[in-house]
Image (spheres, rainbow, N blue to C red):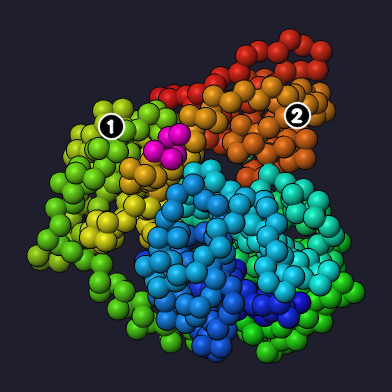
Amino acid sequence: MRVTGTGHASMRIDTNAGSILCDPWVNPAYFASWFPFPDNSLLDWETLGDVDYLYVSHLHRDHFDAAHLKRYVSKKATVLLPEFPTSEMEDEFRELGFTKFLKTRNEEVVELDGGLKIMIQALTSPTDGPIGDSSLWVEYDGVRLLNQNDARPTDLSTFAELGHVHAHMLQFSGAIWYPMVYELPQSAKTAFGKQKRDRQFDRTWRYIDDLKADHVFPIAGPPCFLDDELWQFNDIFDDEGNIFPDQSVFLAEYAKVGGTNGIVLLPGSVSEITTEGATTTHPQPVEEFFANKVAHLEEMRERKRPIIEAEKASWRHPEIDVLKELKQRIEPLLDESIYLAKGVGGPVRFDLVGTDSSGGETIESIVVDFPGKQVRPYADEKVRYRFRTERALIEHLLHIGEVDWVNSLFLSCRFSAARIGQYNEFVYAFFKCLSSERLQYAEGWYDEHERAVDAEDITIGDWVVQRRCPHLKADLSRFGIVDGDQLTCQLHGWRFDLPSGRCLTSVGHKVRAHRVGEEAEVAEAAPSSSS
Ligand code: FES
Protein backbone atom coordinates (compact mmCIF):
# COMPACT_ATOMS: atom_id res chain seq x y z
CA MET A 1 0.00 0.00 0.00
CA ARG A 2 1.37 3.40 -0.97
CA VAL A 3 0.37 6.60 0.83
CA THR A 4 1.21 9.97 -0.69
CA GLY A 5 1.04 12.99 1.61
CA THR A 6 -1.04 15.73 0.00
CA GLY A 7 -1.20 18.22 2.87
CA HIS A 8 -3.18 18.77 6.10
CA ALA A 9 -5.60 15.80 6.48
CA SER A 10 -5.28 14.88 2.85
CA MET A 11 -3.58 11.80 1.41
CA ARG A 12 -3.80 9.57 -1.60
CA ILE A 13 -3.85 5.83 -0.95
CA ASP A 14 -2.77 3.60 -3.85
CA THR A 15 -3.16 -0.16 -4.06
CA ASN A 16 -3.25 -2.62 -6.96
CA ALA A 17 -7.02 -2.72 -6.52
CA GLY A 18 -7.59 1.02 -6.78
CA SER A 19 -6.76 4.45 -5.38
CA ILE A 20 -8.52 6.61 -2.79
CA LEU A 21 -8.07 10.37 -2.45
CA CYS A 22 -8.90 11.64 1.03
CA ASP A 23 -9.89 15.17 2.10
CA PRO A 24 -8.09 17.21 -0.56
CA TRP A 25 -7.91 20.80 0.74
CA VAL A 26 -6.00 23.56 -1.06
CA ASN A 27 -8.02 26.80 -1.10
CA PRO A 28 -8.15 29.01 2.01
CA ALA A 29 -11.02 28.27 4.39
CA TYR A 30 -13.05 30.25 6.93
CA PHE A 31 -12.95 33.80 5.59
CA ALA A 32 -9.49 33.22 4.12
CA SER A 33 -7.96 32.71 7.54
CA TRP A 34 -6.78 29.06 7.31
CA PHE A 35 -4.34 27.82 4.65
CA PRO A 36 -2.88 24.31 4.41
CA PHE A 37 0.52 23.98 6.05
CA PRO A 38 2.93 23.05 4.51
CA ASP A 39 1.79 24.58 1.23
CA ASN A 40 0.31 21.92 -1.07
CA SER A 41 -0.96 24.16 -3.87
CA LEU A 42 1.99 23.36 -6.15
CA LEU A 43 1.39 19.58 -6.22
CA ASP A 44 0.32 17.94 -9.48
CA TRP A 45 -3.38 17.90 -8.62
CA GLU A 46 -4.46 16.89 -12.14
CA THR A 47 -2.72 13.55 -11.59
CA LEU A 48 -3.59 13.23 -7.89
CA GLY A 49 -7.27 13.87 -8.63
CA ASP A 50 -7.46 11.09 -11.20
CA VAL A 51 -8.59 8.43 -8.74
CA ASP A 52 -11.01 5.53 -8.38
CA TYR A 53 -12.48 6.58 -5.04
CA LEU A 54 -12.92 9.83 -3.15
CA TYR A 55 -13.41 10.03 0.60
CA VAL A 56 -14.17 13.26 2.46
CA SER A 57 -14.44 12.76 6.19
CA HIS A 58 -16.84 15.62 6.90
CA LEU A 59 -18.01 19.02 5.73
CA HIS A 60 -15.57 21.30 7.54
CA ARG A 61 -14.07 23.53 4.88
CA ASP A 62 -10.51 22.41 5.56
CA HIS A 63 -11.65 18.92 4.48
CA PHE A 64 -14.39 19.62 1.97
CA ASP A 65 -12.90 22.12 -0.52
CA ALA A 66 -15.72 22.52 -3.03
CA ALA A 67 -13.77 24.56 -5.61
CA HIS A 68 -10.89 22.11 -5.58
CA LEU A 69 -13.12 19.03 -5.77
CA LYS A 70 -14.97 20.53 -8.70
CA ARG A 71 -11.86 21.50 -10.65
CA TYR A 72 -9.43 18.67 -9.93
CA VAL A 73 -11.10 15.46 -8.83
CA SER A 74 -12.30 13.04 -11.53
CA LYS A 75 -16.07 12.82 -11.70
CA LYS A 76 -15.59 9.15 -12.54
CA ALA A 77 -14.47 8.61 -8.95
CA THR A 78 -16.88 6.79 -6.66
CA VAL A 79 -17.54 8.85 -3.54
CA LEU A 80 -17.34 6.81 -0.32
CA LEU A 81 -20.06 8.38 1.83
CA PRO A 82 -20.13 8.08 5.63
CA GLU A 83 -23.56 7.28 7.06
CA PHE A 84 -24.47 10.76 8.26
CA PRO A 85 -27.93 11.68 9.56
CA THR A 86 -28.63 14.27 6.86
CA SER A 87 -28.05 14.15 3.10
CA GLU A 88 -26.10 17.42 3.06
CA MET A 89 -22.78 15.87 2.05
CA GLU A 90 -24.24 13.86 -0.83
CA ASP A 91 -26.21 16.92 -1.97
CA GLU A 92 -23.03 19.01 -2.03
CA PHE A 93 -21.16 16.35 -4.02
CA ARG A 94 -23.99 16.10 -6.55
CA GLU A 95 -23.90 19.86 -7.03
CA LEU A 96 -20.20 19.58 -7.85
CA GLY A 97 -20.91 17.01 -10.58
CA PHE A 98 -20.22 13.71 -8.80
CA THR A 99 -22.69 10.97 -9.71
CA LYS A 100 -21.20 7.72 -8.34
CA PHE A 101 -21.71 7.04 -4.66
CA LEU A 102 -21.10 4.20 -2.29
CA LYS A 103 -23.31 4.82 0.74
CA THR A 104 -21.55 2.94 3.50
CA ARG A 105 -23.25 1.55 6.59
CA ASN A 106 -21.75 2.66 9.83
CA GLU A 107 -18.88 0.38 10.91
CA GLU A 108 -19.61 -2.23 8.20
CA VAL A 109 -16.68 -3.51 6.18
CA VAL A 110 -17.25 -3.32 2.42
CA GLU A 111 -15.20 -5.31 -0.07
CA LEU A 112 -14.61 -3.34 -3.27
CA ASP A 113 -13.37 -4.68 -6.59
CA GLY A 114 -10.00 -6.45 -6.49
CA GLY A 115 -10.12 -7.25 -2.77
CA LEU A 116 -9.78 -3.68 -1.46
CA LYS A 117 -11.70 -3.43 1.81
CA ILE A 118 -12.93 -0.27 3.49
CA MET A 119 -14.95 0.61 6.55
CA ILE A 120 -16.16 4.05 7.65
CA GLN A 121 -17.09 4.94 11.18
CA ALA A 122 -19.43 7.94 11.29
CA LEU A 123 -19.76 10.05 14.43
CA THR A 124 -23.05 11.87 14.48
CA SER A 125 -23.40 14.04 17.57
CA PRO A 126 -24.12 17.72 16.87
CA THR A 127 -20.68 18.52 18.25
CA ASP A 128 -18.86 16.20 15.80
CA GLY A 129 -17.92 18.41 12.88
CA PRO A 130 -20.85 20.04 11.15
CA ILE A 131 -23.39 17.28 11.92
CA GLY A 132 -20.89 14.48 11.64
CA ASP A 133 -17.24 13.51 11.36
CA SER A 134 -15.77 10.18 10.32
CA SER A 135 -12.74 7.89 10.03
CA LEU A 136 -11.74 5.56 7.19
CA TRP A 137 -10.25 2.09 7.67
CA VAL A 138 -8.63 0.42 4.65
CA GLU A 139 -7.23 -3.09 4.13
CA TYR A 140 -5.44 -4.45 1.12
CA ASP A 141 -3.17 -7.45 0.81
CA GLY A 142 -2.88 -7.83 4.58
CA VAL A 143 -1.93 -4.18 5.20
CA ARG A 144 -4.36 -2.17 7.34
CA LEU A 145 -4.57 1.58 7.63
CA LEU A 146 -6.72 3.79 9.84
CA ASN A 147 -7.21 7.36 8.71
CA GLN A 148 -8.75 8.58 11.96
CA ASN A 149 -8.51 12.13 10.69
CA ASP A 150 -9.72 14.63 13.31
CA ALA A 151 -12.57 12.39 14.49
CA ARG A 152 -12.78 11.61 18.18
CA PRO A 153 -14.42 8.26 18.74
CA THR A 154 -14.78 7.24 22.35
CA ASP A 155 -12.36 4.39 21.68
CA LEU A 156 -10.76 2.60 18.74
CA SER A 157 -11.89 -0.94 19.56
CA THR A 158 -14.07 -1.17 16.42
CA PHE A 159 -10.94 -0.83 14.32
CA ALA A 160 -8.66 -2.86 16.56
CA GLU A 161 -11.06 -5.81 16.33
CA LEU A 162 -10.50 -5.97 12.57
CA GLY A 163 -6.87 -6.93 13.07
CA HIS A 164 -3.53 -5.31 13.75
CA VAL A 165 -3.26 -1.87 12.12
CA HIS A 166 -0.03 -0.95 10.34
CA ALA A 167 -0.58 2.76 9.69
CA HIS A 168 -2.49 5.10 12.00
CA MET A 169 -3.14 8.67 10.80
CA LEU A 170 -4.54 11.07 13.40
CA GLN A 171 -4.81 14.66 14.52
CA PHE A 172 -2.52 16.03 17.21
CA SER A 173 -2.74 19.83 16.89
CA GLY A 174 -5.43 22.44 17.58
CA ALA A 175 -8.33 23.36 15.32
CA ILE A 176 -10.40 25.83 17.31
CA TRP A 177 -10.58 29.48 18.34
CA TYR A 178 -10.05 28.86 22.06
CA PRO A 179 -8.49 30.55 23.92
CA MET A 180 -7.06 33.06 21.46
CA VAL A 181 -10.21 35.04 20.72
CA TYR A 182 -11.25 35.49 24.35
CA GLU A 183 -10.86 38.95 25.85
CA LEU A 184 -8.57 37.86 28.66
CA PRO A 185 -5.26 39.07 30.05
CA GLN A 186 -2.39 37.62 28.02
CA SER A 187 -1.12 35.62 31.00
CA ALA A 188 -4.49 33.84 31.33
CA LYS A 189 -4.63 33.14 27.61
CA THR A 190 -1.16 31.63 27.75
CA ALA A 191 -2.10 29.44 30.72
CA PHE A 192 -5.32 28.21 29.07
CA GLY A 193 -3.53 27.69 25.76
CA LYS A 194 -0.82 25.64 27.44
CA GLN A 195 -3.44 23.47 29.15
CA LYS A 196 -5.15 22.95 25.82
CA ARG A 197 -1.88 22.14 24.03
CA ASP A 198 -1.03 19.55 26.71
CA ARG A 199 -4.51 18.01 26.51
CA GLN A 200 -4.30 17.68 22.74
CA PHE A 201 -1.09 15.70 23.08
CA ASP A 202 -2.47 13.58 25.95
CA ARG A 203 -5.48 12.64 23.86
CA THR A 204 -3.24 11.77 20.91
CA TRP A 205 -1.04 9.49 23.06
CA ARG A 206 -4.18 7.80 24.36
CA TYR A 207 -5.42 6.99 20.85
CA ILE A 208 -1.99 5.84 19.72
CA ASP A 209 -1.75 3.58 22.73
CA ASP A 210 -5.26 2.22 22.07
CA LEU A 211 -4.40 1.05 18.57
CA LYS A 212 -0.69 0.24 18.86
CA ALA A 213 -0.16 0.55 15.13
CA ASP A 214 3.27 -0.06 13.59
CA HIS A 215 3.49 3.51 12.28
CA VAL A 216 1.87 6.75 13.38
CA PHE A 217 1.33 9.64 10.98
CA PRO A 218 0.47 13.07 12.47
CA ILE A 219 -2.07 14.70 10.15
CA ALA A 220 -4.98 17.16 10.07
CA GLY A 221 -3.14 20.20 11.27
CA PRO A 222 -2.06 22.70 12.07
CA PRO A 223 -3.28 25.18 9.45
CA CYS A 224 -1.30 28.36 8.86
CA PHE A 225 -2.56 31.91 9.11
CA LEU A 226 -1.30 34.19 6.34
CA ASP A 227 -3.40 37.31 6.82
CA ASP A 228 -1.39 39.94 8.72
CA GLU A 229 -4.31 40.27 11.16
CA LEU A 230 -3.96 36.59 12.16
CA TRP A 231 -0.21 36.01 11.71
CA GLN A 232 0.30 35.79 15.49
CA PHE A 233 -1.58 32.46 15.60
CA ASN A 234 1.26 30.64 13.81
CA ASP A 235 3.41 28.67 16.24
CA ILE A 236 6.63 30.52 15.42
CA PHE A 237 7.02 32.77 18.47
CA ASP A 238 8.10 30.24 21.12
CA ASP A 239 4.72 30.70 22.79
CA GLU A 240 3.97 27.77 25.09
CA GLY A 241 0.27 28.76 24.97
CA ASN A 242 0.01 28.39 21.19
CA ILE A 243 -2.46 25.60 20.37
CA PHE A 244 -1.11 24.96 16.85
CA PRO A 245 2.08 22.90 17.31
CA ASP A 246 3.37 21.46 14.04
CA GLN A 247 4.47 17.97 13.01
CA SER A 248 8.08 18.50 14.12
CA VAL A 249 6.84 19.42 17.62
CA PHE A 250 4.71 16.28 17.53
CA LEU A 251 7.81 14.16 16.88
CA ALA A 252 9.71 15.84 19.73
CA GLU A 253 6.83 15.46 22.21
CA TYR A 254 6.14 11.90 21.08
CA ALA A 255 9.77 11.01 21.69
CA LYS A 256 9.42 12.27 25.28
CA VAL A 257 6.74 9.62 25.92
CA GLY A 258 8.81 6.95 24.21
CA GLY A 259 7.30 7.19 20.73
CA THR A 260 9.72 6.13 18.00
CA ASN A 261 7.37 5.15 15.16
CA GLY A 262 6.18 8.59 14.01
CA ILE A 263 6.35 9.43 10.29
CA VAL A 264 5.76 12.95 9.02
CA LEU A 265 4.42 13.29 5.50
CA LEU A 266 5.19 16.54 3.71
CA PRO A 267 3.09 17.29 0.63
CA GLY A 268 4.65 14.98 -1.94
CA SER A 269 6.16 12.51 0.57
CA VAL A 270 5.51 8.87 -0.34
CA SER A 271 5.33 6.03 2.16
CA GLU A 272 5.34 2.41 0.98
CA ILE A 273 3.71 0.39 3.74
CA THR A 274 3.89 -3.38 4.05
CA THR A 275 3.21 -5.78 6.90
CA GLU A 276 6.96 -5.73 7.53
CA GLY A 277 7.65 -1.99 7.64
CA ALA A 278 7.42 1.37 5.91
CA THR A 279 9.84 3.13 3.57
CA THR A 280 9.28 6.84 3.13
CA THR A 281 10.77 9.32 0.70
CA HIS A 282 10.35 13.08 0.98
CA PRO A 283 10.58 15.96 -1.50
CA GLN A 284 13.10 17.54 0.88
CA PRO A 285 14.53 16.49 4.25
CA VAL A 286 11.81 16.91 6.88
CA GLU A 287 14.12 18.46 9.48
CA GLU A 288 15.40 20.96 6.96
CA PHE A 289 11.85 21.93 6.02
CA PHE A 290 10.83 22.66 9.62
CA ALA A 291 14.09 24.49 10.33
CA ASN A 292 13.04 26.92 7.59
CA LYS A 293 9.40 27.15 8.66
CA VAL A 294 9.34 30.93 9.12
CA ALA A 295 10.82 31.54 5.67
CA HIS A 296 8.28 29.11 4.18
CA LEU A 297 5.40 30.95 5.84
CA GLU A 298 6.71 34.38 4.83
CA GLU A 299 7.09 33.29 1.23
CA MET A 300 3.56 31.82 1.28
CA ARG A 301 2.21 35.00 2.83
CA GLU A 302 3.49 37.12 -0.05
CA ARG A 303 2.28 34.65 -2.68
CA LYS A 304 -1.22 34.32 -1.21
CA ARG A 305 -1.75 38.00 -0.38
CA PRO A 306 -3.79 38.72 -3.56
CA ILE A 307 -6.13 35.79 -2.76
CA ILE A 308 -6.80 37.15 0.72
CA GLU A 309 -7.35 40.68 -0.59
CA ALA A 310 -9.79 39.44 -3.25
CA GLU A 311 -11.78 37.48 -0.66
CA LYS A 312 -11.93 40.42 1.72
CA ALA A 313 -13.27 42.64 -1.06
CA SER A 314 -16.23 40.27 -1.52
CA TRP A 315 -17.56 40.30 2.05
CA ARG A 316 -19.31 43.69 2.31
CA HIS A 317 -23.00 43.92 1.47
CA PRO A 318 -24.03 47.23 3.04
CA GLU A 319 -27.47 46.98 1.45
CA ILE A 320 -28.37 44.20 3.93
CA ASP A 321 -30.35 45.23 7.00
CA VAL A 322 -28.60 42.87 9.42
CA LEU A 323 -31.08 43.14 12.30
CA LYS A 324 -34.08 42.57 10.04
CA GLU A 325 -32.46 39.60 8.27
CA LEU A 326 -31.33 38.00 11.52
CA LYS A 327 -34.85 38.32 12.91
CA GLN A 328 -36.29 36.66 9.83
CA ARG A 329 -33.84 33.78 9.86
CA ILE A 330 -33.24 33.13 13.53
CA GLU A 331 -36.56 33.77 15.26
CA PRO A 332 -38.35 30.80 13.61
CA LEU A 333 -35.45 28.60 14.76
CA LEU A 334 -35.65 29.96 18.30
CA ASP A 335 -39.33 29.02 18.27
CA GLU A 336 -38.45 25.46 17.23
CA SER A 337 -35.65 25.10 19.76
CA ILE A 338 -36.25 23.46 23.12
CA TYR A 339 -33.02 21.83 24.27
CA LEU A 340 -30.54 24.21 22.66
CA ALA A 341 -32.43 27.35 23.71
CA LYS A 342 -32.75 26.03 27.25
CA GLY A 343 -29.10 25.02 27.23
CA VAL A 344 -27.95 28.50 26.21
CA GLY A 345 -30.28 29.92 28.84
CA GLY A 346 -29.65 33.65 28.32
CA PRO A 347 -29.13 36.40 25.76
CA VAL A 348 -26.15 36.30 23.39
CA ARG A 349 -24.91 39.65 22.09
CA PHE A 350 -23.21 40.43 18.80
CA ASP A 351 -21.32 43.72 18.46
CA LEU A 352 -20.96 44.43 14.76
CA VAL A 353 -18.18 46.84 13.95
CA GLY A 354 -18.48 48.90 10.78
CA THR A 355 -17.48 52.28 9.42
CA ASP A 356 -19.64 55.33 8.73
CA SER A 357 -19.40 57.59 5.68
CA SER A 358 -16.62 59.66 7.26
CA GLY A 359 -14.57 56.56 8.04
CA GLY A 360 -15.41 56.50 11.77
CA GLU A 361 -16.11 53.28 13.66
CA THR A 362 -19.71 52.28 14.27
CA ILE A 363 -21.00 49.50 16.49
CA GLU A 364 -24.43 47.94 16.18
CA SER A 365 -25.30 45.68 19.13
CA ILE A 366 -27.81 42.93 18.46
CA VAL A 367 -29.01 40.35 20.94
CA VAL A 368 -30.21 36.83 20.22
CA ASP A 369 -32.49 36.40 23.20
CA PHE A 370 -32.84 32.66 23.75
CA PRO A 371 -35.32 32.72 26.67
CA GLY A 372 -37.35 35.52 24.99
CA LYS A 373 -37.12 33.74 21.59
CA GLN A 374 -36.38 36.92 19.70
CA VAL A 375 -33.65 38.87 17.95
CA ARG A 376 -33.59 42.53 18.93
CA PRO A 377 -31.34 45.51 19.64
CA TYR A 378 -29.21 45.16 22.77
CA ALA A 379 -30.99 46.67 25.77
CA ASP A 380 -28.13 47.33 28.18
CA GLU A 381 -28.66 44.00 29.88
CA LYS A 382 -26.45 41.22 31.25
CA VAL A 383 -25.62 38.70 28.55
CA ARG A 384 -24.31 35.15 28.66
CA TYR A 385 -21.91 35.56 25.71
CA ARG A 386 -20.70 38.58 23.76
CA PHE A 387 -19.12 38.33 20.32
CA ARG A 388 -17.47 41.24 18.54
CA THR A 389 -16.78 41.02 14.84
CA GLU A 390 -16.75 43.00 11.64
CA ARG A 391 -20.20 43.79 10.35
CA ALA A 392 -19.08 42.79 6.84
CA LEU A 393 -18.61 39.17 7.95
CA ILE A 394 -22.20 38.89 9.16
CA GLU A 395 -23.41 40.63 6.00
CA HIS A 396 -21.56 37.97 4.00
CA LEU A 397 -23.03 35.10 6.03
CA LEU A 398 -26.51 36.46 5.44
CA HIS A 399 -25.79 37.07 1.77
CA ILE A 400 -24.77 33.45 1.15
CA GLY A 401 -27.43 32.00 3.49
CA GLU A 402 -24.80 30.29 5.68
CA VAL A 403 -26.41 27.71 7.98
CA ASP A 404 -23.24 26.93 9.93
CA TRP A 405 -21.49 29.86 11.60
CA VAL A 406 -18.97 27.53 13.24
CA ASN A 407 -17.87 26.36 9.78
CA SER A 408 -17.35 29.97 8.70
CA LEU A 409 -17.25 32.77 11.28
CA PHE A 410 -16.05 31.02 14.43
CA LEU A 411 -13.30 28.91 12.87
CA SER A 412 -12.06 32.03 11.08
CA CYS A 413 -10.94 33.42 14.46
CA ARG A 414 -11.93 36.83 13.05
CA PHE A 415 -13.82 37.81 16.19
CA SER A 416 -13.32 38.32 19.89
CA ALA A 417 -15.48 36.91 22.66
CA ALA A 418 -16.31 37.37 26.31
CA ARG A 419 -18.58 35.29 28.48
CA ILE A 420 -19.99 35.17 31.97
CA GLY A 421 -19.49 31.79 33.56
CA GLN A 422 -18.58 28.56 31.90
CA TYR A 423 -18.16 27.52 28.32
CA ASN A 424 -21.56 26.73 26.88
CA GLU A 425 -21.54 24.18 24.06
CA PHE A 426 -25.18 24.91 23.25
CA VAL A 427 -24.28 28.40 22.00
CA TYR A 428 -22.03 26.96 19.31
CA ALA A 429 -24.36 24.01 18.63
CA PHE A 430 -27.17 26.48 17.88
CA PHE A 431 -25.11 28.65 15.56
CA LYS A 432 -24.05 25.62 13.53
CA CYS A 433 -27.70 24.62 13.08
CA LEU A 434 -29.23 27.62 11.35
CA SER A 435 -31.55 25.54 9.22
CA SER A 436 -34.65 23.69 10.26
CA GLU A 437 -33.18 20.35 9.14
CA ARG A 438 -30.05 20.74 11.22
CA LEU A 439 -31.84 22.17 14.22
CA GLN A 440 -34.36 19.36 14.30
CA TYR A 441 -31.58 16.81 14.14
CA ALA A 442 -29.66 18.47 16.99
CA GLU A 443 -32.79 18.84 19.11
CA GLY A 444 -33.63 15.18 18.57
CA TRP A 445 -30.11 14.09 19.40
CA TYR A 446 -30.00 16.02 22.69
CA ASP A 447 -33.48 14.83 23.57
CA GLU A 448 -32.48 11.21 23.08
CA HIS A 449 -29.12 11.48 24.81
CA GLU A 450 -30.12 13.64 27.73
CA ARG A 451 -32.94 11.23 28.53
CA ALA A 452 -30.78 8.15 28.23
CA VAL A 453 -29.94 6.78 31.64
CA ASP A 454 -26.34 5.72 32.06
CA ALA A 455 -26.85 3.06 34.62
CA GLU A 456 -23.37 1.60 34.85
CA ASP A 457 -20.93 2.88 37.45
CA ILE A 458 -17.19 2.35 37.79
CA THR A 459 -14.69 3.06 40.51
CA ILE A 460 -11.76 5.39 39.96
CA GLY A 461 -9.59 5.85 43.02
CA ASP A 462 -11.84 6.80 45.96
CA TRP A 463 -14.82 7.62 43.76
CA VAL A 464 -17.68 5.71 42.16
CA VAL A 465 -18.68 7.54 38.95
CA GLN A 466 -20.94 6.83 36.01
CA ARG A 467 -19.04 4.91 33.38
CA ARG A 468 -19.89 7.17 30.45
CA CYS A 469 -18.75 10.79 30.36
CA PRO A 470 -21.71 13.20 30.52
CA HIS A 471 -20.23 15.11 27.58
CA LEU A 472 -20.04 12.67 24.66
CA LYS A 473 -20.08 9.31 26.39
CA ALA A 474 -16.36 8.53 26.53
CA ASP A 475 -15.64 5.47 28.63
CA LEU A 476 -14.30 6.99 31.85
CA SER A 477 -12.62 3.74 32.81
CA ARG A 478 -10.20 4.62 29.98
CA PHE A 479 -10.38 8.41 29.72
CA GLY A 480 -11.19 9.40 33.32
CA ILE A 481 -8.53 10.64 35.71
CA VAL A 482 -9.31 11.57 39.29
CA ASP A 483 -7.11 14.08 41.06
CA GLY A 484 -8.37 14.82 44.58
CA ASP A 485 -12.04 15.72 44.20
CA GLN A 486 -11.80 16.47 40.52
CA LEU A 487 -12.47 14.19 37.57
CA THR A 488 -10.98 14.99 34.15
CA CYS A 489 -12.16 13.21 31.02
CA GLN A 490 -9.19 13.20 28.71
CA LEU A 491 -11.18 12.91 25.51
CA HIS A 492 -11.98 16.62 25.38
CA GLY A 493 -10.49 17.63 28.72
CA TRP A 494 -13.78 18.38 30.51
CA ARG A 495 -13.51 18.58 34.31
CA PHE A 496 -16.07 17.72 36.98
CA ASP A 497 -16.29 18.51 40.67
CA LEU A 498 -17.03 15.12 42.18
CA PRO A 499 -18.67 16.09 45.52
CA SER A 500 -21.31 18.20 43.72
CA GLY A 501 -21.20 16.42 40.34
CA ARG A 502 -21.00 19.86 38.69
CA CYS A 503 -19.29 20.15 35.32
CA LEU A 504 -16.55 22.78 35.65
CA THR A 505 -16.07 23.12 31.91
CA SER A 506 -19.55 23.70 30.53
CA VAL A 507 -23.08 24.47 31.56
CA GLY A 508 -25.17 21.38 32.41
CA HIS A 509 -23.65 17.89 32.04
CA LYS A 510 -23.69 16.90 35.69
CA VAL A 511 -21.83 13.70 36.52
CA ARG A 512 -23.17 11.07 38.90
CA ALA A 513 -20.58 10.35 41.56
CA HIS A 514 -20.17 9.39 45.17
CA ARG A 515 -17.34 8.34 47.42
CA VAL A 516 -16.66 4.66 47.71
CA GLY A 517 -18.75 3.39 50.64
CA GLU A 518 -21.22 6.32 50.58
CA GLU A 519 -24.77 6.50 49.21
CA ALA A 520 -25.35 7.61 45.59
CA GLU A 521 -27.49 10.64 44.65
CA VAL A 522 -29.76 10.87 41.59
CA ALA A 523 -28.09 12.74 38.75
CA GLU A 524 -29.61 15.68 36.87
CA ALA A 525 -31.09 14.54 33.57
CA ALA A 526 -31.46 17.66 31.41
CA PRO A 527 -29.14 20.56 30.64
CA SER A 528 -29.53 23.18 33.36
CA SER A 529 -30.24 26.79 32.51
CA SER A 530 -28.27 28.29 35.36
CA SER A 531 -28.24 32.05 35.41
S1 FES B 1 -16.48 12.81 26.11
FE1 FES B 1 -15.86 14.87 25.87
S2 FES B 1 -14.91 15.33 27.77
FE2 FES B 1 -15.62 13.31 28.00
The residue to which callout 1 is attached is 335
In the rendered image, the residue lying farthest to the top is 519
Identify the magenta region. Answer: 440-444
Q: Is mark 2 within 8 Å of ligand 1?
A: no
As drawn, the label of residue 484 is 2
Q: Is residue 237 left or right of residue 97?
A: right
Contact (Cβ within 8 Å) of mark 1 with mark 2: no
Q: Is residue 143 left or right of residue 89?
A: right
Helix, strand or loop at label 2? It is loop
Q: Residue at x 36, y 80 (%)?
A: 307
Q: Nearer the viewer, residue 4 or 251?
A: 4
> In the rendered image of this protein, does residue 350 appear above or below residue 485?
below
Q: Is mark 1 within 8 Å of ligand 1?
A: no
Question: Which quadrant of the figure has residue 173?
Answer: bottom right
Q: Position of residue 353 (x, y in %)?
A: 24, 56
Q: Amino acid at mark 2?
A: Gly
- Residue 453 visible (yes or no): yes
> In the rendered image of this protein, does residue 448 appear above or below residue 414?
above
Q: Main secondary structure of the magenta part?
A: helix
Helix, strand or loop at label 1? It is helix
Q: Position of residue 151 (x, y in %)?
A: 61, 54
Q: Is residue 64 left or right of residue 120?
A: left
Q: Residue at x 81, y 51 (%)?
A: 161
In the rendered image, the residue lying farthest to the front is 113
